[in-house]
Image: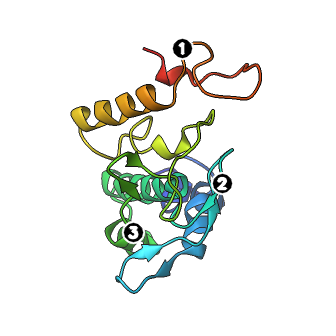
Amino acid sequence: MASGTRGLGGIGRAKGSRSRRTAGRRYYVHFLFEGADGRLHLPTTLSPEYAGAKDCNYDLVLLRWGCTTLIESAHQLSIEDEPLPKWQDVPTRLVDPPQGPDGLWIGADRQLTDSHRHYSHLLWFYPLCLLGNGDDALDYLDTLLDKFVQPNTMYRESGPVLEPPCPARR
């Protein structure tokens, strides 16, 4: 490691960038609480352009991905960093993504009942690839396409639409 760098935050950068690299993870960890089930949960947060929900899938996936990425980086670079045990604890105890027989929900207390432009609750599948296998991902995407995506503008809206969800195109 270059002189003047330290820990995961200093990988290839000047001392002090650690706070920038881990800020997102610290932001989410601040809100976590242990539920009666012993798992780590998030209070109500917002899913982009949808609504608030407890254990919001958008935030859960970003938290799991952020901690997992920091852990993998530390392992690959043989870095022992003080917060590493906390980073390892979070993905191990983090609640599973809220879902039902119809697919992933927005959060634990909110199903996807209306179409919206940003299918942020599906980050588990794309682009972060943290959930399921290819067949499961295809099933979920088929549900999305069959239930919500329209052939004209690719989703239901009350007026003209200029921003279609391009990843859902076939």
Residues at circles 3 and 1 in contact by the CB criterion of under 8 Å: no
Report the front residue among 45 and 154.
Answer: 154
Q: Which mark is residue 63?
A: none
> Residue 100 vs residue 81: left or right?
left
What residue lies at 43% left-to-right and 52% top-to-bottom? 65
Percent from the top left, x then y, of residue 28? Answer: 58, 66
Q: Most extreme residue toward the bottom, as rendered?
A: 36
Out of 118 and 69, give the one closest to the viewer.
118
Q: Amino acid at mark 2?
A: Ala
N-term mark: 2 or 1:
2
In the drawing, what numbered circle is on residue 151?
1
- Give me the disc on residue 51: 2
Measure the alpha-carbon separation of dots 3 and 1: 37 Å
Give the mark toward the camera: 3 or 2: 2
Q: Who comes first in sequence, dot 3 or dot 2?
A: 2
Q: Earlier in the sequence, mark 3 or mark 1?
A: 3
Viewer-closest of 108 and 59: 108
Give x and y (percent) for residue 23.
63, 61
> Does dot 1 land on a helix, a strand or a loop?
loop
Q: Residue at x 58, y 25 (%)?
A: 165
Q: Quadrant of the C terminus?
A: top left
Label placed on residue 94: 3
Report, in whole angstroms, how far the alpha carbon at label 2 lies from the one at label 1.
25 Å
